[in-house]
Image (cartoon, rainbow, N blue to C red):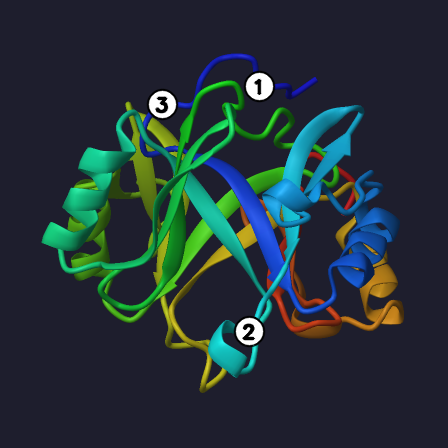
Amino acid sequence: MPEVTDPYPPGTPCWIDLMVPDQQAALDFYRDLFGWQGEVGPEEYGGYSMCTQRGMPVAGIMQSTAPDGQPPPPAGWTTYFASADIGSTESRVVDEGGALLVPPMQVGEMGWMMVGADPQGAVFGLWQGKEFPGAGIVNEHGALIWNQLITTEIPAAAEFYHALGMECEPIPDMPGFTAFKVQGHTVGGVQDMHNMDPGIPPHWLVHFAVDDTDSTVDAAVHAGSTLRVPAFDLEKVGRLAVLQDPQGALFAVIAPTGQTA
């Protein structure tokens, strides 16, 4: 079973969460799609929902709020990278031309978090775990398996994320694909935006592992999602599709090579 028991090395994607206008609707949607369990959390944490599989955390869902009477931010998934010292990592984000969106803050005894944006505008989070290291299950149906940066400037993005602990390298046996690595292990990828819909800004795209891509797409569309990239086979990787959930958040699903497609 792909359960995570060791701390995530700095720079590794360690957690994901979703901000939406209707938290309960999102909880219902992802419960039905992936089998997650979760409910609106305590008021002291803004109602933040910790979603689980087999009793282990896989993702968070929270209600978006409208600052100063403005419209709420668009629905979206955020990828969080592990940090050994969130204060010093915050400084590197700013020094490298990124933006600080949510300053570092302590989340009870669980750890510390912050949210920023890279110089091209892709939003990401940082997490320094204390009692909570991050996702307890990865790489299985309904759990995080991959994070892909969709950006306008790959060289600039490579330089920025290098400062956060990641190396950007071509994948030797997959021409045209570039990977982010931490301590020699591939933890994510990056691609340019030439084939993206106009108007979609640079972003980190969260990928969930599924047993069957086509049936998952059918279920998601039946539940109100929009299919953005129809299912296709990616050599040596798996069968992949990109969806937009009923509240507008983009995400991808993939049945890895060797599983049912």
Q: Secondary structure at mark 2?
A: loop
> Which numbered mark, 1 or 2, is in the foreground of this view?
2
The residue at the far bottom in this view is: 198
Which comes sooner in the sequence, label 2 or label 3? 3
Tell me the amino acid under the disc marked 3. Pro
Residue 68, image x, y percentages = 48, 77
Disc 1 marks which residue? Answer: 4
Residue 46, image x, y percentages = 62, 49
Q: Secondary structure at mark 1?
A: loop
Task: Between residue 188 and residue 98, name the one nearer to us.
Answer: 98
The residue at the far left in this view is: 95
Q: CA distance from mark 2 to mark 3?
A: 34 Å
Residue 252 sits in quarter: bottom right
Depicted 196 relative to depicted 218: above or below:
below
Disc 2 marks which residue? Answer: 66
Q: Residue at x 85, y 55 (%)?
A: 28
Residue 233 appearing in the image: no
Which comes sooner in the sequence, label 1 or label 2? 1
Q: CA distance from mark 1 to mark 3?
A: 12 Å
Horizontally, residue 26 falls left or right of residue 244, namely right
Tell me the amino acid under the disc marked 2. Ala
Residue 75, image x, y percentages = 60, 68
Q: Secondary structure at mark 3?
A: loop
Residue 219 sits in quarter: bottom right
Tell me the amino acid under the disc marked 1. Val
Disc 3 marks which residue? Answer: 9
Q: CA distance from mark 1 to mark 2?
A: 35 Å
